[in-house]
């Protein structure tokens, strides 16, 4: 729970939109940048089961790297290999250019924040945070100052003397964070760090996490199955499935230019239209998707052979809905409203097109007292531009 | 649930408790008997308690029993905890199922067999029988009780606590002593208490393992009862019953208080 704080200096800075003050932070685009962590053809098998499948990826200093995927996709295994709790079956993991395979967990310059927080119940908050410092080469007399610093960073000054069961869930989460950051690790691993918090607290804490990450300059690797969380906090997101990274990219590129049907479908809401593409020159394609309907006009960067089966993916908020056929739009399709989901800030219309296909259109409710323009069973026109969607190969 | 008082409930309660406690009650009453004949009541007296204090044979047997119980239960607690930790945490290793089966075997083994096999062992390696051999024997048979109690605690123990300790720079040994052991301490202590009580009242195994130089209290009682029950034994038993009763009451009060404090703490945490 957020405590009213008497010292204004310790208050978290005003929340900045992700990337606003670091527009140039993109070491993954810099061929000279030296990665902090390198996975080189890493495979992990549990008996016959392949948890991580020949994975190669670089993670850079100061990154906030999110591993996103459904349960069983290998994201936790990947993290536990970094922490040293799982061995690598094949391939190597380099931290700062050094193979970490022979280094036991207690000697690694990584720290982990556990999903269950794993606070030591027999120690006070203060002793929990000091636990790692007492086992480091930090001089004894500097430990109290460092613990106080961590307590300030996580706004826990008043709770140092309490035991973990004497504080709330949100405070426990912050103790776990303070404890894992106390040794100033090169790399902090966060395993579903906000999973146990309720939604409101989780959103507040996400911004706190970003703030702390920026203040300390630590490289964070976070495991989550919550895509909103990954999109909010991360500088790059890796979408995983069956031990492979399907796409590794910035949140906006993951959302706007997914490289596969899997990613498009996994992140956010999407309309997927199956069809056959015909090239029309200049990167423009016509996609035949239904008998007797005009083709969808779309652009694609890669060359696509004529007649290739493709998926056209378009986000619902990029589909406009209107009662009259709109003028000058590249794509216009007629349909009938099947269902309306009113969510307060937005409304989603489920529209049935010719041939029974459903397409969703999302509209922001930017006026409080507007008359509802459409209702069930209305005939409507959906429209979108040529560049609103992406063409994905199967 | 029917919470009303009924004759059936009252009868079963009375019968059950009578079954459990009437023998002990009779023993306690007769320990205050004036008469030398155990079964004839001749008025109230505490003289047998006085005689008991003057009986060196009983007192030295009690002292031996206490020493044996303390040493063997401590040894058993250490070994049993180690065994439980390996079996629960050791991961998969060759013969793990066999080992975990074998550690429980002494629980179901007839005591006579355990005692006899120990006796044969001591004779064959030429070990002089005395206090030391009784301690060894008691450690052997109480250790598996400790390991059952401790491993049932370890199974529910959040493994990430140990991983967190390793992650924060502990060696596996340091992690065990500074995180695992303090948390499972209640289980180790109750295992120790169990081993202690088992050792206190063991007769069969002690009879096999003991030599002429050491006699435990149960052995002493048993041998003197063969010559006829003396009121002194009643007095001695009454003392033992009262010690156990006081111990049980204290433990239950302490644990009740701990639970109450925990609940109060959690409510306080929920309010902040």
Image (spheres, coloured by chain):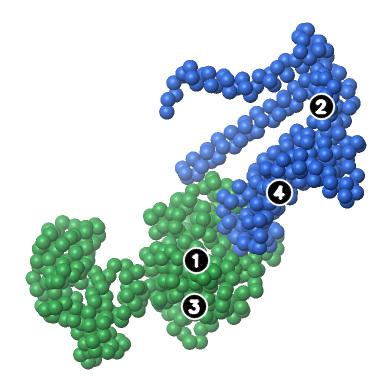
Chain colours: A green, B blue
Q: Quadrant of residue A224?
A: bottom left
Which quadrant holds the C terminus of chain A?
Answer: bottom left
Q: Confirm or deny contact between disc 3 and disc 2 (CB under 8 A).
A: no
Give the label on residue B45, or none. Answer: none
Label 3 sits on a secondary structure element that is strand
In this view, the residue in front, B60 or A58, is: B60
Residue that numbered label 1 is attached to = A76
Give the label on residue B80, or none. Answer: 4
Give the label on residue A55, or none. Answer: 3
Label 2 sits on a secondary structure element that is helix
Calculate the distance from the C-alpha at mark 4 to the C-alpha at mark 1: 34 Å
Q: Provide residue A336's location: percent of width, then percent of height.
A: 12, 66
Q: Provide residue B10's location: percent of width, then percent of height.
A: 52, 18
Label 4 sits on a secondary structure element that is helix
In this view, the residue in front, B227 or A340, is: B227
The chain holding disc 3 is: A
Residue that numbered label 2 is attached to = B221
Residue at point 48%, 76% (across, down): A53
In this view, the mark in front (4 or 3): 4
Residue at point 27%, 89% (across, down): A305
Residue B254 seen from this side: yes
């Amino acid at each position: 729970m957020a405590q009213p704080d008497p010292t204004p200096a310790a208050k978290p800075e005003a929340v900045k939109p992700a990337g606003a003050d670091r527009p140039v932070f993109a070491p993954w685009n810099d061929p000279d940048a030296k990665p902090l962590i390198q996975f080189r053809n890493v495979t992990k098998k549990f008996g016959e089961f392949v948890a991580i499948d020949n994975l190669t990826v670089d993670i850079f200093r100061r990154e906030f790297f999110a591993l996103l995927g459904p349960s069983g996709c290998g994201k936790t295994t990947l993290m536990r290999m970094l922490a040293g709790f799982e061995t690598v079956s094949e391939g190597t993991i380099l931290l700062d250019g050094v193979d970490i395979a022979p280094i036991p967990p207690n000697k690694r310059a990584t720290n982990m924040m556990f999903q269950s927080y794993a606070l030591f119940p027999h120690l006070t908050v203060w002793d929990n945070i000091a636990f790692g410092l007492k086992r480091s080469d930090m001089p004894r007399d500097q430990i109290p100052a460092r613990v106080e610093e961590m307590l300030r960073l996580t706004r826990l000054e008043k709770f140092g003397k309490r035991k973990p069961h004497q504080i709330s869930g949100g405070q426990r989460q912050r103790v776990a964070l303070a404890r894992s950051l106390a040794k100033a690790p090169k790399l902090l691993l966060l395993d579903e760090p906000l999973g146990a918090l309720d939604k409101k607290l989780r959103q507040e804490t996400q911004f706190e996490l970003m703030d702390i990450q920026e203040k300390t300059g630590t490289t964070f690797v976070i495991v989550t199955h919550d895509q909103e969380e990954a999109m909010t906090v991360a500088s790059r997101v890796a979408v995983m499935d069956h031990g492979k990274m399907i796409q590794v990219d910035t949140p906006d590129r993951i959302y706007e230019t997914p490289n596969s049907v899997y990613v498009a479908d996994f992140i956010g809401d999407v309309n997927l239209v199956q069809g056959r593409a015909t090239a029309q020159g200049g990167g423009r394609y016509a996609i035949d998707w239904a008998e007797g309907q005009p083709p969808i006009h779309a652009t694609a960067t890669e060359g696509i052979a004529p007649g290739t089966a493709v998926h056209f993916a378009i986000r619902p908020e990029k589909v406009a809905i209107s009662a009259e056929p709109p003028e000058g739009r590249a794509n216009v399709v007629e349909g009938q409203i099947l269902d309306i989901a009113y969510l307060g800030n937005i409304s989603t219309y489920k529209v049935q097109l010719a041939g029974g296909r459903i397409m969703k259109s999302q509209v922001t409710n930017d006026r409080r007292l507007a008359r509802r323009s459409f209702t069930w069973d209305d005939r409507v026109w959906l429209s979108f531009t040529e560049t609103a969607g992406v063409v994905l190969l199967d | 649930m029917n919470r009303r008082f009924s004759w059936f409930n009252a009868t079963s309660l009375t019968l059950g408790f009578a079954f459990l406690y009437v023998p002990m009650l009779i023993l306690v009453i007769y320990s205050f008997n004036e008469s030398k004949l155990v079964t004839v009541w001749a008025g109230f007296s505490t003289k047998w308690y006085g005689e008991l204090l003057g009986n060196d044979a009983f007192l030295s047997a009690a002292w031996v029993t206490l020493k044996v119980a303390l040493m063997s239960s401590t040894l058993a607690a250490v070994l049993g905890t180690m065994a439980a930790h390996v079996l629960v945490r050791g991961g998969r290793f060759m013969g793990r199922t066999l080992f975990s089966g074998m550690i429980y075997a002494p629980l179901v083994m007839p005591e006579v067999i355990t005692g006899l096999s120990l006796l044969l062992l001591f004779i064959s390696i030429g070990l002089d029988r005395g206090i030391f051999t009784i301690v060894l024997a008691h450690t052997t048979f109480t250790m598996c009780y400790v390991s059952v109690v401790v491993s049932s605690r370890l199974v529910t123990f959040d493994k990430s606590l140990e991983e967190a300790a390793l992650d924060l720079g502990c060696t596996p040994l340091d992690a065990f002593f500074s995180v695992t052991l303090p948390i499972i301490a209640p289980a180790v202590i109750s295992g120790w208490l169990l081993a202690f009580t088992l050792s206190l009242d063991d007769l069969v195994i002690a009879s096999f393992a003991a030599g002429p130089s050491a006699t435990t209290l149960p052995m002493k009682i048993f041998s003197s009862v063969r010559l006829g029950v003396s009121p002194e034994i009643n007095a001695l038993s009454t003392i033992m019953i009262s010690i156990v009763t006081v111990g049980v009451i204290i433990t239950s009060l302490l644990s009740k208080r701990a639970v109450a404090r925990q609940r109060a703490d959690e409510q306080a945490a929920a309010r902040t």
